[in-house]
Amino acid sequence: MNILVVDDSATMRRIVSNALNNIGYKNITTAEDGSEALKKIKQEQFDAIMTDWNMPRMDGLSLVREVRKMENYKEVPIVMITTEGGKREVITAIKEGVNNYIIKPFTVQTLKNKLEDII
């Protein structure tokens, strides 16, 4: 399984990547914002996308909107990993095409459970 992790924080990219490694996912690519992620998405097919919401240049919600327009990404699971934990934000993200939602900080078990729910 090929997973793309998108977050403007190098520390969070490392935390999410390490958590994914710990639960058995080894093919992980990272991007520092939605713009960089879109470039990578156009070059390579990913099986799941984990994205932060708040990022410079292109935020996570804008990334989700762009990804969902692509025919080969209409069914790819997307997990939003963010500090935005309000009910309104969760509803907005799901309406835009996010399959699951994780609020930072999170545990490896939470990540595992959320991924298992959608994969």
Image (spheres, helix red, strand yellow):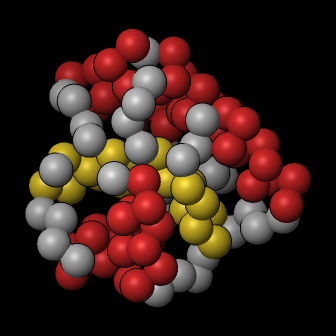
- In the figure, is residue 63 to the left or right of 37? right
Q: Can residue 90 be seen in the rendering of this structure? A: yes
Res 117 → quadrant? bottom left
Front in this rendered view, residue 88 or 5: 88
- In the figure, is residue 68 to the left or right of 72? right
Residue 42, x across and y down, in percent: 29, 20
Res 94 → quadrant? top right
- In the figure, is residue 24 to the left or right of 59? left
Measured along the vertical axis of the image, is residue 60 above or below residue 10?
Answer: above
Front in this rendered view, residue 100 or 31: 100
Give the residue displayed 25% in from the left and 37% down from the top: 46
Residue 30, x across and y down, in percent: 30, 52
The total number of labels drawn is 0
Give the residue displayed 16% in from the left and 50% down from the top: 1
Residue 8, x across and y down, in percent: 49, 55
Front in this rendered view, residue 80 or 57: 80
Measured along the vertical axis of the image, is residue 12 above or below residue 99?
Answer: below
Give the residue displayed 27% in from the left and 70% down from the top: 20
Give the residue displayed 64% in from the left and 39% down from the top: 61
Measured along the vertical axis of the image, is residue 39 above or below residue 115?
Answer: above
Front in this rendered view, residue 51 or 47: 47
Q: Can residue 56 be seen in the rendering of this structure? A: no
- In the figure, is residue 4 to the left or right of 78? left
